[in-house]
Amino acid sequence: MADSHVLSALSTKRGELLGSIRHYKQLIYSLDKDLATIDATIRIFDPNYSFKDTKITNIHRNRFFNNGEAKTLILTILKNQDNPMRTDVLSDIVASKKGLLFENDFEARGFKKAVNNALVLLKNANLIEQTAKEGAKFGIALVYATQEPSSVHPNILANTENLFVTHLNNDDEIKALSKYYDFKSFAASLKKAQDVGFARIKTLSSNYVVPTQIKLFEPHELKNEYNNLPKATWFENAPIPKRSN
């Protein structure tokens, strides 16, 4: 039974590939006819024209989107997302927004590749760096986490006002971080101290980096500590106003 399922899936896949091959063969046949017509027309005007000098131009770099459309759709979708999103899920949402239905896996893979290319263009356009640098004036905050400070763009680090740094075991990473605030004074301890929860914290409200032991968050223990706090003698509950009928 299992073999029949495998054979059925492979047969379906083979049919999709044959359909794609037939489609593109017909397309190539049609394009060849158009090319022959253009060549014959050129010969009428110049019998000695050298076709080898013709520059090949690829006009099918992105057949799914108009100029700038992919980046706009991606940014609109990501702006409304609260959680990270896989690229394949993003591709499906973009396709749904455009009302696209793919006849075979070849077209679906081509569309996902187009979405990935748009993401690369957004990254190369330094969109994240621009957000970190200019976002404050628009009320936009950026939260990021990394194990390699050296991989973060210098513009982002330079505009980061709250840093929580734990153990780093690489001199290059420590050197990258030592350029900012007074983390250089903690370079040695960043490499040596491996205590869980021990961090060096720089916040907007503090002028200096502060070594801090972060306690594991235990809601039940926190509640018990609160309940065991001595009652303040100077505090009284506000009287409840009486409601008039």
Image (tube, rainbow, N blue to C red):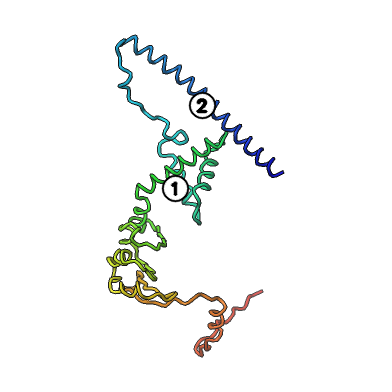
Asked if residue 159 is positioned above or below residue 211 in the image, the reply reads above
Identity of the residue drawn at 60% across and 33% down: 14
Q: Where does residue 36 sit, x and y in percent of width and height?
A: 42, 15
What is the spatial separation of the Cα atoms under label 1 and label 2, in whole angstroms?
33 Å
Label 1 packing within 10 angstroms: few (<14), some (14-19), many (20+) = few
Q: Amino acid at mark 2?
A: Tyr
- Position of the N terminus, as image quadrant, is top right
Q: Nearer the viewer, mark 1 or mark 2?
A: 2
Q: Where does residue 113 sit, x and y in percent of width and height?
A: 46, 41
| Side of 110 relative to 153 (left or right) | right
Residue identified by numbered label 1: 75
Q: Within the image, what quadrant is residue 237 found in?
A: bottom right
Q: Within the image, what quadrant is residue 99 found in?
A: top right
Q: Amino acid at mark 1?
A: Leu
Residue identified by numbered label 2: 24
- Position of the C terminus, as image quadrant, is bottom right
Asked if residue 103 is positioned above or below residue 29 in the image, the reply reads below
